[in-house]
Amino acid sequence: MSRRWIPPHGYCWKVIHDPTRTSGHPGVFYGGHFRWMDIELPSACRAKIPCPWPAGTVFENIKTGERVVIRRGRAVRMEASCPS
């Protein structure tokens, strides 16, 4: 019986698109799990610390399926796509 890896408590945001990923390189963040506080810095910190994520990085919440993308240094909720 094999065990499935479970991320540590709170690390429920997985990188599903990493703009640093190329055909020959897996990317810096792809597949990593992060906390919300790692993605969206508190407003007091934003003035001092630039956004650590490249624009276009997409995170998916592994529990809810919610997705956010990094745009202009901020995490923005992605609109749910409607089936055609």
Image (cartoon, helix red, strand yellow):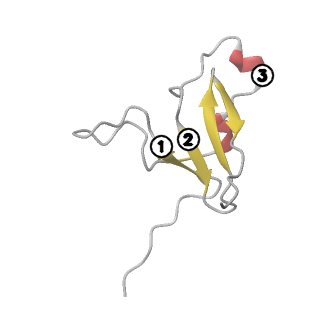
Q: Earlier in the sequence, mark 1 or mark 3?
A: 1
Dot 2 or dot 1: first in sequence order is: 1
Estimate the spatial distance between the alpha carbons at disc 2 and disc 1, rounded to whole Å.
Answer: 5 Å
Q: What residue is at 43 percent from the left and 33 percent from the top?
A: 19
Q: Give the residue furthest to the left.
A: 24
Q: Nearer the viewer, residue 80 or 43?
A: 80
Q: Which mark is drawn over residue 26?
A: none
Circles 2 and 1 in contact, beta carbons < 8 Å:
yes
The residue wearing badge 1 is 17
* Residue 50 placement (x, y as % from top left): 60, 16
Q: Is residue 35 left or right of residue 77?
A: left
Q: Helix or strand or loop: what does disc 1 sit on? A: strand
Q: Residues within 10 Å of mark 3 (few under 14, many from 20)?
A: few
Q: Is disc 2 placed on a helix, strand or loop? A: strand
Give the residue number, with chain letter if any, for mark 3. 43
Task: Judge by depth and name the residue closer to the eye, 6 or 29.
Answer: 29
Q: Position of residue 83 (x, y in %)?
A: 66, 61
* Residue neighbourhood size for the residue with mark 1, other residues' Cα within 10 Å, grouped as few (<14), some (14–19), many (≥20): some
Disc 2 versus disc 3: nearer the observer = 2
Which residue is painted at 54% across and 26% down in the image? 55
The label on residue 58 is 2
Query: Residue extending furthest front?
Result: 84
- Kindly state the secondary structure of the residue where label 3 is placed: helix
Where, by quadrant of the figure, is residue 52 drawn? top right
